[in-house]
Amino acid sequence: MAAKRPTIYDVAREAGVSKSLVSLVLQGSDKVSAAKRDAVRRAIATLGYRPSRAATTLAANRSRTIGVLVDDYTNLWFVELLKGLRAAVEPRGYKVLLGDIASGGPDVRASLEGFLSLDVDGLVIAAEALPDSSRDLGIPVVVAGNRAVRHPGAVVVAGDDALGAEMAARHLLGLGHLRLGHLTGPGEAARVRAEAFRAAVEAHPGASLTVRAAEGTLEPDGYASAVELLGDAPEVTAVLAANDTMALGAAAALRGAGRRIPEDVSLMGYDDSPLAGSHLLDLSSVDYRGVVVGSDVGAVLLEWLDGGSPSAPPQAAPRIVPRGSTGPAPTGR
């Protein structure tokens, strides 16, 4: 006859604590003293207890899942965001579920309703907007990044886009560039970056700026807008793209026009994605601190789920990562 499988009550009896305290330890709660947590863990090891995931979920009335809605899988910034988020929540037993709402319309509603039907404990919105954005979803909601639409009761966690763009301008102006270009795209973050970059350039004596806006922020958008920029303002010696992916397209356009990087035109991206650090591109970029933003998103959600009243943390401070794509302005330009 097989030995009886130990229960949570056996663990509580062995550790000399209550069943509810054992449940808190299994949920990863930080509301248990170190001594009692150690006692529970010793009891678990002694008895060989293996918790039933279904029973633990039911007891906690939680699914132990966090939903993340993104609107562009190809945006490399999401890689860093998810890395930071997972590092924050997975040690506490939460899993991250990802949903794509890029297609818009009914599919967006389906993705949102799908998460809600799974009883996710919290939701991260890494997209410009949701349908019925005035709707209270009834769960903790964190908006990741600067977004045009706010959601009821949501906490916004973002990096400082305006400061990052200003730092990019200072970097290029400090290298002697006075004829600058900027490739921008849709979305609130791109708008904030464009406005801050323009303000910083226009405040510098003798400097001028040409801006070209694209319908998207992908590599083809960067290429097309850079071709247009070079046609309208061939005198530019430095270009900031709204993100690293657009900068990749801009690099192709510059080289196609016979412009050397950085000897003729310095090129900068934004986000400091893995693409920027590649040996082929060697792209100077603004580090948005996506991992930090993701970690902050996770911390806000965990505080909320633990019964706290979270508030937005300070915006993550960006930093310039100079590489081989930027250099001194060419003489005589």
Image: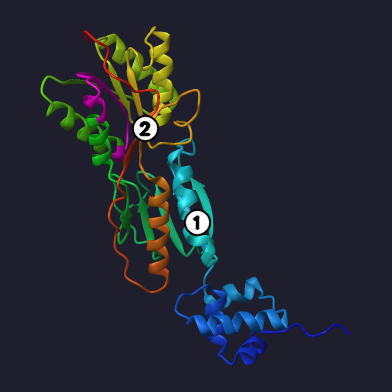
Q: Would residue 238 appear left or right of 131 to someone viewing this image?
A: left
Q: Say which element carries label 2.
A: strand
Q: Earlier in the sequence, mark 1 or mark 2?
A: 1
Which amino acid type corresponds to the residue marked 1 in the rendered image? Answer: Ala
Which numbered dot is residue 87? 1
Residue 173 forms part of the magenta stretch: yes
Is residue 155 or residue 82 the one in the foreground?
Answer: 82
Image location of residue 208, percent across then percent down: 17, 20
* In this view, 120 is above or below 51: above
Residue at point 76%, 82% (across, down): 5
Residue at point 58%, 72% (across, down): 57
Q: Would residue 115 appear left or right of 52 to someone viewing this image?
A: left
The image quarter containing residue 286 is: top left
Q: Which residue is mark 2?
A: 285
Image location of residue 188, percent across then percent down: 29, 40
Image location of residue 88, percent across then percent down: 47, 59
* In this view, 137 is above or below 327: below
Is the N terminus in the top left, top right, bottom left or bottom right quadrant?
A: bottom right
* In this view, 251 is above or below 171: above
Q: Is residue 195 visible?
A: yes
Residue 181 forms part of the magenta stretch: yes
Residue at point 65%, 86% (across, down): 11
Which segment did they paint magenta?
171-189
Residue at point 68%, 84% (across, down): 7
> Local crowd at mark 1 within 10 Å, few (<14), some, or many (≥20)?
some
- State the CA–CA distance, disc 1 to disc 2: 24 Å
The image quarter containing residue 252 is: top left
> Local crowd at mark 2 within 10 Å, few (<14), some, or many (≥20)?
many
